[in-house]
Image: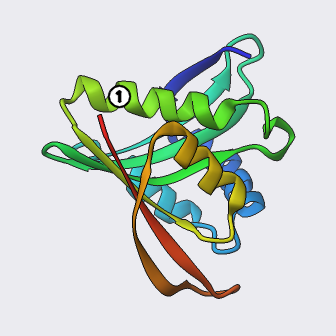
């Protein structure tokens, strides 16, 4: 599947929120997503769509300052998981960062999210720390990763 990436619009938020609820035990609210998406100075919320059907298949949220960025969210609609779309989204994030002369990307992930941890490691992210009991419901550690580009 070939993806097209575009900045999220207000009308995308309900669908993004549905994916958010299906993907995370502590999903962001629609208002939080919009607050993130509407700050074009240092943040972006980007939709990933199937080029052929225009279906929203995933999204990412990224914040950046100077030469560093933090991935706040990456999510793929459940029916499209395990098809390489997470890697394609990471490739797009890396391209986006390269255009802005960002040299380091950070993220945190639940330690028990084995699929995401494996994806980030295979993409070249290195574990740089752990926050014990960072997440609630369910309680879990946050693993901190960084990638130099």
Q: How many marks?
A: 1
- The answer to whether 12 is drawn above or below residue 71 in the figure is above
Q: Residue at x 29, y 48 (%)?
A: 69
Q: Residue at x 39, y 31 (%)?
A: 94
Question: Quick one: quadrant of the N terminus?
Answer: top right
Res. 145 image quadrant: bottom left
- Is residue 112 rendered to the left or right of residue 7? right
Q: Assess disc 1: are there few (<14), some (14-19) or many (≥20) residues with their C-alpha within 10 Å of its C-alpha.
A: few
In percent of width and height, residue 99 lies at 25, 23
In percent of width and height, residue 144 lies at 42, 65
Question: Quick one: quadrant of the C terminus?
Answer: top left
Depth order, front residue of 73/132: 132
- Is residue 35 rendered to the left or right of residue 90? left
Q: Residue at x 81, y 35 (%)?
A: 80
- The answer to whether 129 is drawn above or below residue 70 in the figure is below
Depth order, front residue of 128/47: 128
> Which residue corresponds to mark 1?
96
In percent of width and height, residue 140 lies at 62, 82
Res. 98 image quadrant: top left
- The answer to whether 83 is drawn above or below residue 138 in the figure is above
Does dot 1 land on a helix, a strand or a loop?
A: helix
In percent of width and height, residue 40 lies at 28, 42
Depth order, front residue of 86/128: 128
Q: Residue furthest right?
A: 79
Q: Residue at x 70, y 60 (%)?
A: 114
Identify the coloring: rainbow
């Amino acid at each position: 599947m070939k993806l097209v990436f575009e900045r999220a619009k207000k009308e995308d938020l309900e669908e993004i929120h549905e994916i958010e609820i299906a993907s995370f035990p502590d999903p962001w609210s629609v208002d939080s997503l919009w607050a993130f998406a509407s700050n074009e100075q240092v943040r972006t919320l980007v939709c990933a769509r199937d080029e052929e059907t225009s279906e929203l298949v995933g999204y990412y949220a990224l914040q950046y300052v100077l030469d560093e960025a933090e991935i706040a969210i990456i999510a793929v609609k459940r029916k499209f998981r395990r098809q390489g779309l997470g890697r394609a989204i990471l490739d797009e994030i890396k391209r986006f960062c390269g255009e802005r002369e960002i040299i380091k990307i950070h993220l945190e992930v639940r330690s028990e999210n084995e699929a995401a941890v494996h994806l980030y490691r295979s993409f070249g992210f290195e574990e740089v720390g752990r926050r014990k009991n960072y997440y609630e419901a369910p309680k879990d550690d946050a693993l901190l990763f960084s990638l130099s580009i």
